[in-house]
Image (cartoon, rainbow, N blue to C red):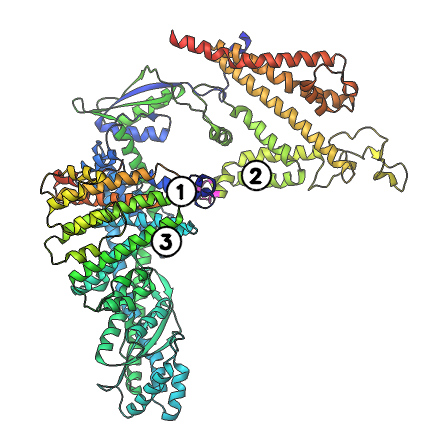
Amino acid sequence: MEYIDRLPAMDLMRSEKMMLVQLIIPVESAHRAVSYLGELGLLQFRDLNDDKSPFQRTFVNQVKRCAEMSRKLRFIKEQIHKAGLTPSPSPAPQPDIDLEELEIQLEEHEHGLIEMNANSEKLQQTYNELLEFKMVLQKAGDFLLSTGSHVATQETELAENIHVNDDYAETSSLLEQVGSNFQEMLPGPSNQTGVRFISGIICKSKVLRFERMLFRTTRGNMLFNQAPTDDQILDPATNELVEKIVFVVFFSGEQARVKILKICEAFGANCYPVAEDTIRRRQITREVLSHLSDLETTLEAGLRHRDKALISIGFHLAKWMNMVRREKAVYDTLNMLNFDVTKKCLVGEGWCPIFAKTKIQEALQRATTDSNSQVGVIFHVMHSVESPPTYFKTNHLTNAYQEIVDAYGVAKYQEANPAVYTIITFPFLFAVMFGDWGHGICLLLGALFLIAREKKLGSQKLGSFMEMLFGGRYVLLLMSLFSIYCGLIYNEFFSVPFHIFGNSAYRCRDTTCSDSRSVGLVKYQDTYPFGVDPSWRGSRSELPFLNSLKMKMSILFGIAQMNLGIILSYFNARYFGNSLDIKYQFVPQMIFLNSLFGYLSLLIIIKWCSGSQADLYHVMIYMFLSPFEDLGENKLFWGQNVLQVILLLLAVIAVPWMLFPKPFILKRLHTE
Amino acid sequence: MYGFEALTFNIHGGYLEAIVRGYRSGLLTAADYNNLCQCETLDDIKMHLSATEYGSYLQNEPSPLHTTTIVEKCTLKLVDEYKHMLAQATEPLSTFLEYITYGHMIDNVVLIVTGTLHERDVQELLEKCHPLGMFDSIATLAVAQNMRELYRLVLVDTPLAPYFSECITSEDLDDMNIEIMRNTLYKAYLEDFYRFCKTLGGATAEIMSDLLAFEADRRAVNITINSIGTELTRDDRRKLYSNFGLLYPYGHEELAVCEDIDQVRAAMEKYPPYQSIFSKLSYGESQMLDKAFYEEEVKRLCLAFEQQFHYGVFFAYMRLREQEIRNLMWISECVAQNQKSRVHDSVVFIF
């Protein structure tokens, strides 16, 4: 047993030995020291200012500045995204920039962008208004034209153009009334009395409610004409294209006019006056069109200017964001240290692995020289009673497995790490379930692709699913290799068996093969050398055979893995010198597991090797129900009966041995 | 059957009850309030809130903050949570959740009508409305001249329509009438809500009856105190009291004839739950009454969470969130105006 103790320590098997260190850093080199330590990534600082609120800490102003800068950077990024550009790093090398300069630059950029946005929004607003005016002139002109034509055809045309509200059936008299009004009105257009109209434009989504509201307010004494516009209008607030509808409301009376205007305002409908005279209308339309083209060119120029500014900022954006994040992390860490005013230094405590000691001291030395400080950083080991954190040194191959194991629970300090075995057992057990070498080859190709593109895919941002696949690329690789192996054993290539290892060992008795469905084939050669014989596929007893095979195999693997787990607990107990665990936990657990399920595994192996037809279900169940009964045809070896009784007794003793002594002994130790 | 809701509640309401309890655990605690009360500037408040659940809503605001911005963003968070819950709810929970917002709708209607009366711009008023109480044609309230028009034009389409039957008059709108209208609407709403909860039965009915009864009683006391010295007659005052609650009907009789605070106190001290509130005030003082009522309400709302499998938790959560936003507004105002000594006057701790 001492042999086990003398074996060299495996890196991944137990977590690294940690030590608690205390750092005393002079103020001038503090920032640099923490920054270099951060790059190293091997020291975990303890928060010494736990009881203080966030704004009582020493470096709160710097943290606020960093938060403000990252807010500006987010704003700029959003602007770039809204403009539809993609930021790309510029090819030319950029000079390094200081944090204060960055702050000033960001302030300028943000101001500039906000101004440019405000200007273009104003322009867009004016442009929209003119565009709406143009549409209103076009469509309202159609309405008014139709009303200004012959008296005789007037009513029918009105009837066609009018949008009748279904709920209220009294429109016919209203129509005649308005028609007669128009007849009177023909010689002169809009009078002071009589029917007048308001024209305007409104969003399509609101037009139904708008009409209903108008109807209610005027108690039905109005005519509502609407027509959809040909183009859509860009809404500056939401940056989306909205469909609009041109409407004309005919009404009479001053009060109705006031009410209708208020309702238009409430619904956000814009009203534009339309002259009734056709010639005047055409003149206005021409003016509006020329204005529109002017505005268009101005708008485009403004947008181009803004896009150029955004692209030039976009070159640096990724770098700046990284810088601000790092600075914020550095200040957050500095906030964890204790500020000793008299000695003008910062005191910090943290955990680091023992192997990293030289690297950390080197980094601190570099920080001292770089900041031209007179005093060096004091670094000394402290003694601690609490349990250190668990740190495993992993590379990118073992990292994925360590994460999988950590998801079930992180090991305590220096406890045996199951990840060592998981590297093989996890993909292997997956393969036992997957078991198809055709699918395995596809999986292998996928995994190889991910590994080949490691560098490229690692630097870009992937979706959540791809990120999971990419993170597990080495797991996928091993899974695929084992799947190919298991697929060869099960002899399945996309569920089709192949004769890779020679001919099948079975053949029909005669050429008609009539016995393939009744008595079965005969064996005429030696057993198929590797894997399941291809003749099994499609035979009548394929499923009972394969199911039995896979189930027994799974039982063997499962019990082996459970045994492995219990043996690992033995190594743990030995390492921590816990003889209580060995005597009252490991031994009874091994006895219990192996006397029942280990015995079952033994029976499986014997049945496979001897070709007996014993029913193992029966054996196991009656081992408990009637252990002294004779086995009869289920007997596999001599002395099986006696052995079963002994194993049963051992299992029964093991249970109270496992459960009772340890708590009482622990209680006694505790009270002492 | 009351007592067996554990069997069937989780089929439709289990997910949302879990969600709302998760939201509740994000409410600010007494430790948070203590820290907030020690802030010197609004930026400190923003920094402290960024460590709580309000973080993502406040982090994109530029630095010179206003108190209205803080309150607006916090309300936005409440509205988002409410909309998330409403989207996932089925009947009858969705109707229950909608009932919770009718109070805000009434407040918004009154706000716009009052504002129009005082010649203010409609868009400005719309921005001041509470987002939970918005409905489609709310902007057209500005057109109405009297209550009948108000109903006929706008409110007939809204869920508030059935509450109007008692208060349609042809009088023109003025300040007094608007307040009476608000209280009448609210009375009808509370009674309708109460009836709805009773039809739901079970634990919901019991817990919600208790909470709504407290609300009705509180409103009765507030109406009494606010109408002392105005031209509101006793009959009118009695008409504004709801027809359920601890004070119904004998307490209402007494309150209707009260002419000053001491008479109110005498009337209320006959009821044990309210006696403890009124005993905290010394004679003649009514400023602390609001805070005392809020504290009692918060206590009852927190108790609603002690039981599972009922809808009262949703109502309680919305009310607690609103109280939290009121607290934040008070703290921000005190900090912004440099009157930190008065901070604890009006902050009600929830936990």
Q: Where is residue B240 in the image (x, y as percent from the top left)?
A: 22, 55
Could you say where residue B58 lies in the image, as x and y percent from the top left?
28, 45
Nearest the viewer among A70 and B210 is B210
Residue at 38% from the left image edge and 55% from the top image edge: A85
Residue hosting label 3: A81
Label 1 to label 3: alpha-carbon separation:
38 Å
Question: Which residue is disc 1 drawn over?
Answer: B17
Q: Is residue A266 above or below residue A450?
A: below
Task: Write the residue at 42% across / 8% down.
Answer: A668
Kind of residue sitting beneath label 2: Ala
Vertical placement of residue B17 versus A226, above or below: above
The answer as to whether the residues below labels 1 and 3 share one chain is no
Which of the 4 quarters of the picture holds residue B335?
Answer: top left
The chain letter under disc 1 is B
Q: Which image quarter: residue A342?
A: top left
Q: Is residue A459 one of those drawn in magenta?
A: yes
Residues rendered magenta in the picture: A458-464
Spot occupied by residue A464 in the image (x, y as percentages of width and height): 47, 43
Residue, disc 2 = A447
Q: Which of B193 and A316 is in front in this view?
A: B193
Crowd class of label 1 (few under 14; some 14 to 19; many from 20; radius 10 Å): many
